[in-house]
Amino acid sequence: MKQAVLHAPLDLKVVETDIPALDDGDLLLRVESALVCGTDVRIYEGRKKRNVTYPTVMGHEFSATVADSAGPLPDGLSIGDLVCVYPLLPCGHCVACSREHPNLCRNRIAFGYQLPGGFSQFVRVPAAAVRAGNVVAVNGISPAAAAIIEPLACAYNGQRLASAQGASTMLVSGCGPLGLMHIRLARQLGAQRIVAVDPIRERRALAEVSGADLALSPGPGAADRILDWTEGAGVDVLVMAVGRTDAVHPYLGVLAPGARVSVFAGFSGEGTNLEIPANDVHYNEWTFVGASSSRLGDFQAVAGLVRSGALHVEDLVGTQLPIDAVTDALHLAASGRDLRVGVAPWG
């Protein structure tokens, strides 16, 4: 089989290797679609090394077909099922796990970090992940839609933590693929009115197609227009869907009393400090909440929404390049010129 192996930052090679052997309780998956996350780009470039074990096979957003099993399959799974895979396997006993934050487990292992991920034609799922319910059947949808469930679950986690369900007004700052996912998810979860901000005209158009009532270019006047749009009330929830401080700073003046801010996107490099006036937080009772990855329950909930047809996301998957062009896929994803770029293992 073919597999893209990262030996060190910028040292990525596609190799021919054996299909993984299975231990008792393991599953063998035939990868159908794998998407490129911004985290994959940072791992490839060497800007993210925490929890990465070299050599590694990146790709934690993927769908697959169940190809083989070393032992009885768990209830709800059959050979030939299309599945998506929750990528984290927490330890279950550390402080984070014991306080119901298993996604923050410092001892966790994950596909695409320590476990070989989806930039491969086949993936072995360890028995512990099979028992934990990480493999979720999603028959009846496309492989691309199944692969995008993982980042969508991250968006679900961010909105849940910010108590965004049923928000009267929401501002999504940044309309890349994840910003668009936030808009669609917010609509599904009952947000009444959504405004989106992005500098790229095409993305603003996609934001409106995705359910935004208003899509604005950032810059002078954007905050005033949002205030006018809310008749001076401000927004209840701000989702920071791009890792830039200017995704938040210009909009502090449009936060309503009691507003919640989801610091959703990860930052890298310089200029990562948010400057928030303490008295504004104090007197307005604002809540700022982080969001990292997702919990298994988030993943399963979103899988159900996509599988049922309630949430349509397949069109957010952009260019799919063959596994031999995986480096080109990473560069395209880093450019921000496309939607969710993918790696087609059999393309």
Image: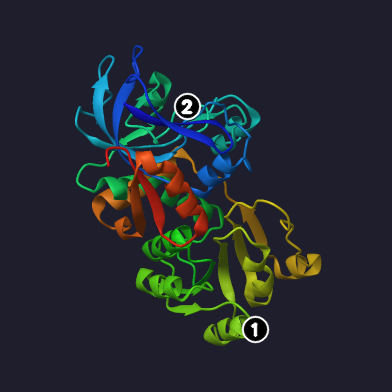
**Quadrant of the image occupied by residue 134:** top left
Which amino acid, mark 2?
A: Leu
- Taking 90 as reference, is 269 left or right? right
> Residue 173: percent from the left, percent from the top?
55, 68
26 to 152, vertically: above or below: above
Residue 289 seen in the current view: yes
> Residue 240: percent from the left, percent from the top?
58, 62
Please tell me which residue is depicted at 47% across the width and 27% down the height of the picture: 115
Please tell me which residue is depicted at 37% across the width and 62% down the height of the picture: 188
**Quadrant of the image occupied by residue 288:** bottom right
Name the foreground residue: 33 vs 281.
33
Q: Quadrant of the N terminus?
A: top left
**Quadrant of the image occupied by residue 74:** top left
Tell me, for residue 220, which label it has, or none: 1
Please tell me which residue is depicted at 27% across the width and 19% down the height of the picture: 69
- Taking 41 as reference, is 125 left or right? left
**Residue that carries the numbered disc 2 in the rendered image:** 115
Which amino acid, mark 1?
A: Pro
Name the foreground residue: 184 vs 232.
184
